[in-house]
Image (spheres, rainbow, N blue to C red):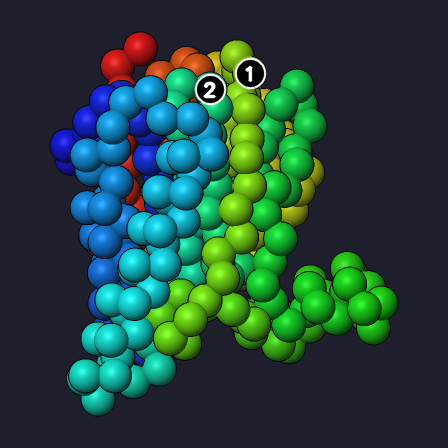
Amino acid sequence: MPGLEQGYTLAIVADGMGGHQAGDTASRLTVETIVQDLQALPSHLSPQEFGDELQRAILHANEIVYREAKEHVEYYNMGTTVVAVLLNEREGIIGHIGDSRVYQFRNSVLTQITEDHSLVNELVKNKQISEQEANVHPHRNVVTRALGTDEQVVADMYSVMLEEGDILLLCSDGLSNYVTPDQMIHTLGVDQLPLDQRAHQLLQYALDAGATIILQSRYWSIMMSPCQAQRGGIYDRSRVRWSLPNY
């Protein structure tokens, strides 16, 4: 995969919905649009400036997916989640829609950066159910915001500053619904293993917890440690895009 120009780092996870074909199309169009829009970012942009570019790219992807769904009946009501991380060395911006997540792992502490746009998260915030109940709620997969399902959408944007040894984990709900925070911490903290092996270990935890082999391709997981110029992941090329500069 060609890298972004000017040394930026880009990682994207998009988990499509609306049926197998429609979901794959939504996620593919999202990744392709964001990568294309960011391919020639000028150098020396401030975090605010390249964050604005990332937000515009995500909203452009929403236009593309929404229009495709309106023009083709087989794609009716298709959409996708998206989490995208754009870094310039150690400073970065995260764009997020849906219930895919970004975690930051630092000094054995795991922090969820993004907030799920999901029914169960709204119920938890309103104190209608507990977090334990949310984990087993029959509607835990229902999202309240998605890319491509509406003509207009809002992307949540977060800034991030990385330190030496930090790891960012991007994943869909297919991983976060099955792998506990303790399992994530244990796996991410095994410094002797390359990041791709740690990603495979997280997938195995998901399978052991009840994920089926048939659905294995839905359990997207990417880890990035740009300060160490490492990456690892389990992904489908149509849904995930990596670009790493040479440090």
Q: Which mark is residue 163?
A: 1
Q: Secondary structure at mark 1?
A: loop
What quarter of the picture does the C terminus occupy? top left
Residue 24 in the image, given as x and y percentages of width and height: 26, 66
Whether residue 86 sits left or right of residue 136 in the image: it is left
The residue under the point 26% across, 14% down is: 246
Label 2 crowding class (10 Å Cα cut-off): few <14, some 14-19, many 20+? some
Residue 120 in the image, given as x and y percentages of width and height: 68, 69
Q: Which residue is mark 2?
A: 90
- Name the amino acid, label 1: Glu
Say which label, 1 or 2, has the lower sequence index: 2
Q: Is residue 77 above or below residue 15?
A: below
Inter-mark Cα distance, 1 to 2: 7 Å
The residue under the point 78% across, 63% down is: 125
Quarter of the image holding residue 111? Answer: top right
- Is the C-beta separation of discs 1 and 2 under 8 Å? yes
